Amino acid sequence: MSVKIADTAEQSDNPVKVVFIGGLGRSGTTLLERLLGQLPGVMPLGEITHLWERDLLGNEMCACGATFSYCEFWQRIGAAAFGSWDSVDVERLGALKATIDRTRHIPALAAKRIAPAQHQLVREYVSYFEKVYQAAAADTNARVVVDSSKHASLAYCLRWSPNIDLRVLHVVRDSRGVAYSWTKQVRRPESPTGDQMTRYSPAKAAMLWNAQNAAFSLLARRGVPVRRVRYERIIQRPRKVIASLARFCDLDLVESDLNFIGDGWADLGPSHSAAGNPMRFTVGRIPIRPDEAWTDDMPDGTRRMVSTLTRPLLGRYGYLNEETLVPEPKEVTAGE
């Protein structure tokens, strides 16, 4: 006997609303989280997939500037969710992640039915995330919590939870810009040892770009509300994009709620983002402008190679129309 999504309908009377920002890293996901996080009723949490190892074990810095063990917000969340962070079995979490939360497991997680044993593991794994989301929403009176973990495999795990009202924002960026960005050396300021962010070769980044974006496209056909948004459109029209995404998240805004976004800039307040791009530490007015260094600095051969490897999805997302304004990508919602 296998388990269907419908079979998990011991649905909570009050599921926590989670907006999951997905896509390959270096696609503008942190910028989107920061902008959404300025809206009333929204609590951005950062990349919760890294919370357990980097923060709970590594005691890295919260976006507020305090180390995890000294951040009052995260200590309240640990107490409310688990009684204490000391109660979290990080070793067990790691074993569960290795067993189910990997890109190679997406085909099984995407099925309409899964074996009871696998379903039990998924529910155990997701329960840790549920507790964090629920505690954060209660602590801040948030209508929506934002998890910018990005990984498609985690989104597929979360879809099996009856206690989460899941919405996904699928962020795409031109694969050539993404591949170029992954070659850069970027220091992780939250790391006490001065670690660098992961780097990938252009070919590796191109293959990851294909895998992650294809996975989120399939997720929309598995009953999860998914909205695709281009990084370039966020940069061009941030106020319009954020207003549209707020409606997708069932947030009722008034015009003044978007006054933190101006012509080419945004004002960002402090946050408690647990992990992610170093931009999460930035507070104050930031410029919103396109990062197009790759158009001049990427070698022609590398650009052709990345273009060839990613051509099908580049065309689908409109990135091959280089001489004209790229059209707005089609909105994708559950059931399409």
Image: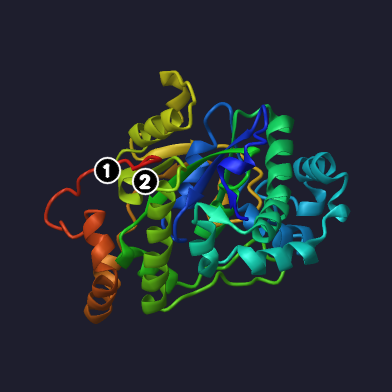
Can residue 281 be seen from the camera position used here? no
Q: Position of residue 61 (x, y in %)?
A: 70, 56
Q: Is residue 232 above or below residue 104?
A: above
Side of 61 where 164 appears, left or right: left
Between residue 25 and residue 309, name the one nearer to us. 309
| Viewer-nearest residue: 80 or 181 | 80
Outermost residue toward the bottom in this view: 301
Quarter placement of the C terminus: top left
Residue 153, quarter of picture? bottom right
Q: Which residue occupies 72% across, 30% down?
A: 138
In-front residue for pair 289/273: 273
> Disc 1 residue type?
Lys
Q: Secondary structure at mark 2?
A: strand
* Residue 258, picture quadrant: top left
CB under 8 Å between discs 1 and 2: yes
* Residue for point 54% across, 58% down: 109
Quarter of the image with the N terminus is bottom right
Q: Amino acid at mark 2?
A: Arg
Q: What crowding class fits label 1: few (fewer than 14 Cα within 10 Å), some (14-19), or many (20 or more)? A: few
Query: Which residue lies most toward the left here?
Result: 323
Q: Position of residue 179 (x, y in %)?
A: 37, 70
Tally of marks: 2
Q: Nearer the viewer, residue 329 or 158?
A: 158
Residue placed under numbered mark 2 in the picture: 228
Residue 192 on image: x %, y %: 72, 67
x 51%, y 44%: residue: 33
Would residue 128 be found to the left or right of residue 203 on screen? right
User: Which residue is disc 1 drawn over?
Assistant: 330
**Residue 68 on image: x %, y %:** 76, 53
Element type at mark 1: loop
